[in-house]
Amino acid sequence: MKTKPMNLNFRSIVIAICLCKVLSYSLNGQTKPVEKQEQLITKNDKSTDWARIILSAAVGYPLSYGDTFLKTYSKKTSHHFNATFFLNPKYIFGYDFNIYKATTDDTTLTGNFDNATICHYYMNMGRQFTIHNFPLSFRSTLGAGWANYRNEFKGVNKLNFKDNGFSMSITGTLQYEFTRFLGIHINAQWIRDFLRIETNQEIQSFFDRANYVFLYAGITFSLR
C-alpha cells in the first residue's frame, strides 16, 4: 500500500518531463520559420540599398533658344557623362560633363571662326524619388560650373581661341534598372551660360549668354 504513491509520483514526473520535451520541440519548430521569414524580409528590404555610385553615359542633341549667337550654329551630337553619389536614400551630389561640336553658318555674325567645340563642367546636388518595390527612379539636380568654347578657323590662316564663363544647369533624369547593376535612362538638361565675350556694345547682348535644352538617352551602371 505504501508503494502506490511513489509509483504515482514517479509516473507524474515522467509525464511532466515528456510534456516539457514536446513543448520545447514545438517551440523550436515555430521559431525557426519565424527566423527564416525575418531573414527573407531583411534580404528583400532595400531600405539600406541606397549606398552606391551611379555612372552614366548618354548621347543626345542640343537645342538652343533665344536671340543669341547660338542660332548661327549647326549643332552636332552631344555626349554626356555623369557620376552620382548618394548622401542618403534621398539626397545626392555628383559631377556632370558634356561636349558637342558645331559649325557656324554665318561667320559675319560670329567672327573669324567656322568650327566650335563646347564643353560644360558641373558640380550638382539634388534629390532622388523612387517607387517602392519598382525599379524606376527620378532624379532632379541643380548644377553650377563652367562653360568652355574652343573656336577654330580651319582656313588657310588657322586661328584658335577660347571663350568661357560661368554656367548653371537644371537636370531631370528618369532611370529604369534591369538589374542591380545595369539600367537605362533618359534626361533633359536646361543650361544657361554667362560668357565673357568682349565685343561692340551694340551687339553685346547677342554674345553674353547662351541658352540650351539638351535631350539625352543612355545607359547607367550602379556600383554597390
Image: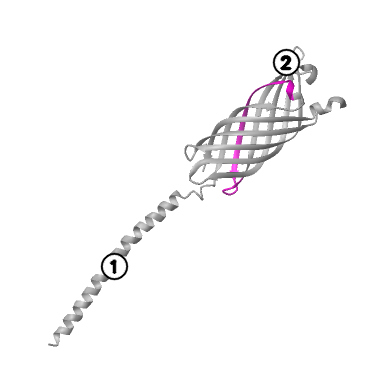
Write the start and end of the magenta stretch as one range: 70-91
Residue 46, relative to residue 65: is it above or below? Answer: below
- For the N terminus, the image quarter is bottom left
- Which is the main secondary structure of the residues drawn in magenta? strand
Question: Closer to us: mark 2 or mark 1?
Answer: 1
Q: Is residue 70 above or below residue 221?
A: above
Number of the label disc, if any, that sits on residue 154 = 2
Residue 146 lies within the magenta run: no
Q: Amino acid at mark 1?
A: Leu
Res 212 quadrant in image: top right
In the foreground, 89 or 83 = 89
Residue at 18% of width from left, 80% of height from top?
8
* Residue 87 sits above or below residue 150 on the image: below
Q: Quick check: 20 left or right of 99?
A: left
Q: Is residue 123 above or below residue 4?
A: above
Q: Earlier in the sequence, mark 2 or mark 1?
A: 1
Its colouring scheme is: one colour
Q: Which mark is residue 23?
A: 1
Q: Secondary structure at mark 2?
A: loop
Residue type at mark 2 is Lys
- Residue 9 percent coordinates (x, y): 20, 81
Q: Quadrant of residue 52?
A: top right
Q: Position of residue 116 (x, y in %)?
A: 71, 22
On the rendered structure, is 194 left or right of 42? right
72 drawn magenta: yes
Q: Position of residue 109 (x, y in %)?
A: 79, 19
Q: Give the class, few, some or many, for how many residues have Cα within 10 Å of label 1's Cα (few <14, many ≥20).
A: few
Q: CA distance from mark 2 to mark 1?
A: 91 Å
Give the image location of residue 143, x and y in percent: 68, 39
